[in-house]
Amino acid sequence: MIPVDITRIRNLSNCTAEVTNNLSSPGPIFDFSTYVHDLLGLKNDLRQAANNLRPVYQEAVAWPFLAFLDQFSPNTFYQLFTRNNESLSDDEQFWRKIIPDICAAIFASCPQNNPCPSHAFQEVVSDLYEGFMCEEDRSNVKRPDLSVIPPLVLWGNPQRGPYTWTIGATLHLGLKAPIVSLPAHHANGGLLGWSTLGHEVGGHDIIAADRGLLDELKGRVQLAVFANTQNEDLATYWENCTSETASDVLGLLNMGPAAGIGLIGYFRGRNANRRLRTEGPYDGPHPVAVLRGFIAARVVAQLQFSQAAEWSRLIEREARNDLQGQIRLHLANGETLGFHNEVAIRTAQIAADTIATARLQRLEGHSLIEIQNWRNRDERICTEIQTAMLLGQNLPQNYQGRGYYATHVVAAAVTGALRSSDPNVEHINTIFNRMKAYLVVMNRGEYTPQRTAYLMGSLHALSTPQGIVYLNQGSGVSNNYCCNIM
């Protein structure tokens, strides 16, 4: 085994502990309960809050959402949130979940609702989404079918972890943008949690915006795993995990190695024993956590920057540290399938390779890794931003304009904290706060008149949704439209 420079991640255990400690910290949690019996008050407050949104989000989110709420009387709205869940239709159960989150996203823009973290969060989300939409990178690749507007952000339930309502969900209410959530405590800390945004935004929201892309990826993954293993159980397992695996892959293509090592630290920090899990449900959408470490290592090895091989070995080393006897998948009937570690790892690598490099019809014969990649230029920008951050300097002026993605700021903060020789949690908090400050500066300069005109033009060019799904009108909405990272 070629030796690796572990000083790159010598502070990983402390960054992991910071995630754990942050789980109990307060955050800007939106209390929807006061509006359950006050629909008119909710609509009035939403109209006022909408004035703080960028014009593109007024048209893509606020006004369509208010139009959707017009179908409810105060009584039917109250009943929606107070009746037993079993008495609600599938659509009503869906509305009961998504309506509070859309409200929280709109209210998150209010100046009194902790604007600094919200603006920092929005900047990362916007740049992750638009990084994949870059006209230069998408040469000869069509625009997405459903949305080119970045998701609107909210501070969500701390128990749920990061998640997104994809455009497939929000379209059912007439919206033209997704909604993405970070647990509210991440407004004040939990640095490694911010590295997961590439999964939610660069992954789920991008995939959902292209009709048929996920189905094509599922088919490719199932065929590739079966061709290499002749094992139907494993082929079906990875087919079911394709959405989450593809989101991991896209997060890595967007954010580089920080997304991979950050994911490992984040999962450990949210687990009581500080280890990656080696078992999970067979029928669930998420790959076993330890296998996601090997997915990250495999993708990072294929990135186009000079230190890719070393970072890949570091990430794989961390994943191997958490391996146990075998990978165990639990069936719904109570039985368990056990697989030798190396067999399971190999299938994870096959799935990662297929998703990253397969030429896809939905992308005009291009692969995801052709459209998005992490290159030496990205590493250089990340290093320069990190240097300023660790020295306590302001964001360099030359990185405040368009063309320098907030992704680099998050990657700089994550990798800077990981390699720090200062074990004190206060030092991690200092890096976190400087990251937020940099992102807020970027956000202020993001929406130039030209930028706003481009987004508004893109919004108006989208095909109009088939219509809002009203009460008692079946939509076939699936819970799969809400995608958690864990």
Image (spheres, grey):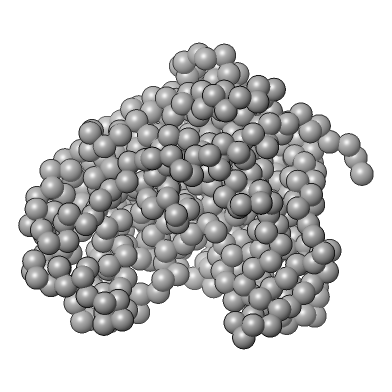
Q: Is residue 270 above or below residue 449?
A: below
Q: Which quarter of the rendering shows the N terminus?
A: top right
- Badge count: 0
* 271 displayed left or right of 463: right
Residue drawn at (47%, 19%), measured in percent from left and top? 395
Q: Residue furthest right?
A: 1
Is 114 positioned to the left or the right of 273 in the image?
left
Q: Is residue 312 visible?
A: no
> Depth check: 312 or 397 in front?
312
Q: Identify the residue at horizontal 54%, vertical 73% (top origin).
A: 215
Q: Residue at x 54, y 52 (%)?
A: 199
Q: Residue at x 62, y 57 (%)?
A: 367
The foreground one among 483 and 54 is 483
| Quadrant containing the C terminus in the rendered view | bottom right
Viewer-proximal residue among 31 and 451: 31
Horizontally, is 22 left or right of 301 in the view?
Answer: left
**Residue 230 in the image, given as x and y percentages of width and height:** 80, 80
- Please identify the quarter of the rendering in which residue 428 is found: top right
Lateral position of residue 333 relative to residue 31, left or right: right
- Determine whether 18 is above or below 98 in the image: above
The single residue placed furthest to the bottom in the displayed view is 333
Foreground pick, 158 / 361? 158
Where residue 311 appears, as percent x and y from the top left, is 75, 39
Query: Is residue 44 in view from this perspective?
Result: yes
Q: Position of residue 405 (x, y in %)?
A: 49, 34
Q: Where's residue 479, x and y in %?
A: 41, 71
